[in-house]
Image (cartoon, grey):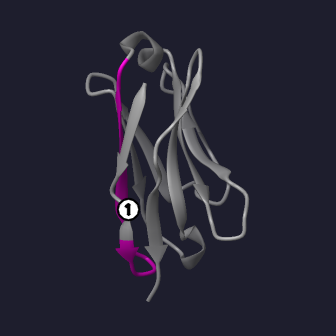
Amino acid sequence: VQLQASGGGLVQPGGSLRLSCAASGNRLHINIAVMGWYRQAPGKQRELVAEIAPGGTANYAGSVKGRFTLDRDVAKATLYLQMNSLRVEDTAVYYCKVRSYETYWGQGTLVTVSS
């Protein structure tokens, strides 16, 4: 399974961005996978942002709950993360992760929230 993440960039506090993670490869692995986004800020450990199970149940970190929304397009094998009301502390490299029989990581996309 290969993951292509995109959508990062520079945004002002209070702004919005939408990240995309397009999965390709073994469709069985993709369809049964838990898909999610993690992030790693400078000097900090990588942390879970949000993840969604094949059935659609989503889990969000407390710091993003109510601001970020996951959307999984099964037909396109793509995971989206809509990020609203962005804060300076959301600045990080965001990584897409797919977990099925194995675990796969995307290459990361940088989100910078700054005025």
Tell which residue pokes out farthest to the top in this image.
Answer: 28
Give the main secondary structure, helix, strand or loop, of the magenta stretch: strand
Count of numbered marks: 1
Residue 22 screen position, x and y as percent: 33, 36
Q: Image point 47% across, 77% down: which residue?
A: 113
The answer to whether residue 73 is left or right of residue 115 is left
Relative to 51, is 20 on the left or the right?
left
Nearer to us in this view, 104 or 114: 104
| Residue at the farthest bottom position | 115
Q: Is residue 96 visible?
A: yes
Image x and y of residue 32, in percent: 49, 15
In the image as oriented, which residue stretches furthest toward the left? 76
- Whether residue 85 appears in this view of the structure is no
Instruction: From this view, report whether residue 91 is shown above or below residue 67.
Output: below
- Taking the image as shown, residue 104 lies to the left or right of residue 45, namely left
Tell me what residue is drawn at x 44 percent, y 89 percent.
115
Q: Amino acid at mark 1?
A: Gly
- Which stretch appears magenta? 10-25
Residue 33 x/y as whole percent: 51, 21
Where disc 1 sits, the SS reads loop
Determine if the magenta segment contains residue 34: no
Dot 1: few (<14), some (14–19), or many (≥20) neighbours within 10 Å? some
Q: Residue at x 71, y 70 (%)?
A: 43
Front position in the image: 28 or 14: 28
The residue lying toward the viewer, choosing from 89 and 66, is: 89
Identify the residue position indicated by label 1 in the image: 8
* Residue depicted at x 48% and y 54%: 68
* Rendered position, 115 above or below 14: below
Name the spot of residue 66 as percent of width and height, x first: 54, 56
The image quarter containing residue 79 is top left
The quarter of the picture where the N terminus appears is top left
